[in-house]
Image: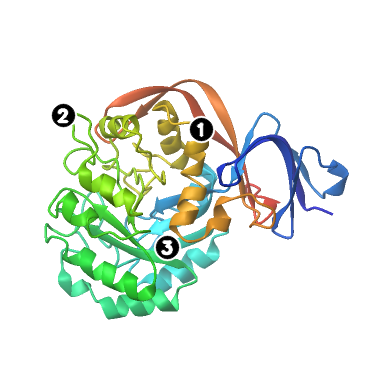
Amino acid sequence: MYDLILKGGRLLDPAEGRDGSSDIAFENGRVAAIEEHIDPGEAREVRDVSGRLVTPGLIDLHTHIYWGGTSLGVDPVRYARQAGTTTMVDAGSAGPGNFHGFRAHVIERTEPRIHAYLNISFAGIFAFSHEVMVGECGDFRLLHPEVCLDVAQRHSDLIVGIKVRVGMAASEGRGAAPLDLALEVADEAGIPVMCHLDNPPPSRLEVVSRLRPGDVMTHCFRPFPGAPARARDGEVREEIIAARERGVLFDIGHGAGSFGFVTAEAMLEAGFQPDCISSDVHTLSIDGPAYDELVTLSKFLALGMPLPDVIAAATSGPARAIGKPELGSLAIGTPGDATVLDLAEGRFEFEDVKGLTREGRQRLVLEGMVLGGRWWEED
């Protein structure tokens, strides 16, 4: 007897090359069957999802959800119910000095899955708000690689990489030294780095030339300065192409200042699609212009990126980035997480971080979620 059957939906699973009408059944927390027709009498619960998209559970690779423990954190449960994200990856809100609190008070109390990048800075992102903004990598006394490595190893079941923020804001223009320390810790721990770059210095070239296969360059479609494509001719910069060729992954990380339509149009026109599309949701971006993962994904539909590629960038792409490919697929036996979406038709206006707008004819709207093989009911 299955726990749940979703009937009649368009099952879109890029990792498995599946796109078509199918029923899907869940049992004991996992995907149990996918067939053209599954007898509804074989399940304890049946949901009719005809006319809806059924995708692997969406993964937002770049969030800030240390709610109550950091100034930028949003409530992960409320966010998941807004964005349809069955897995959220926190991008360095906590550092070695407070990760244990993030684990005990947020991660272990939240039903949707949470993984995290550990910040190289001892205090994590500790002063990020409208009123106070202090870059955590501006004070090198907070960068202690031995302590960071110890915490990463002790919490290896949750920590998927090391996060470092460099740039004029995040590291007060101190160059690439924080990135070098993060890379050393990550290399010893056997995990990747996610690197943020705001306004230089360091330069884009200094940053991307250091990144290794599997490392993540977030904010990859940011506007000038630091944009990956030249505004004058739309050409993708040589160091960006070289980084992709050696296996560096590129993540959107929209946020409040890191996604521009001009850059995105140039990159997509050049055939350079992001590996991962993430929201960088935090207290300064959740009310716009990022809003959430679904709005961010819808912006790429408006830019002409094919729907299967957009869904891949929120499922199999981030699953590969965190080394957990089973989370980005609905193959038989994989964890029973799924997101049910409506592809709404209409006229929708979307805004980037510079206030530029684009109009789209489609928007992804959440219809429901499956967590651990069961329909996630509203509280």
Question: Mark 3: which secondary structure?
Answer: strand
Which residue is pictured at 63% across the width and 57% down the height? 335
Q: Residue 275 at x, y = what percent? A: 41, 46
Which residue is pictured at 27% across the width and 59% down the height? 211
Which residue is pictured at 21% across the width and 41% down the height? 237
Q: Which residue is mark 1?
A: 307
Q: Which residue is mark 2?
A: 232
Say which label, 3 or 2, has the lower sequence index: 3
Q: Horizontal placement of 310 versus 338: left or right?
A: left
Q: Residue 355 at x, y = what percent? A: 26, 30
Q: Residue 377 at x, y = what percent? A: 66, 48
Question: Mark 1: which secondary structure?
Answer: helix
Q: Which residue is mark 3?
A: 116
The Cα atoms of the two marked residues, 3 and 2, are separated by 37 Å
Q: Horizontal placement of 38 versus 344: left or right?
A: right
**Relative depth, front residue between 247 and 57:** 247
Asked whether the viewer can see residue 121, the reply is: no
Q: Amino acid at mark 1?
A: Leu
Closer to viewer: mark 3 or mark 2: 2
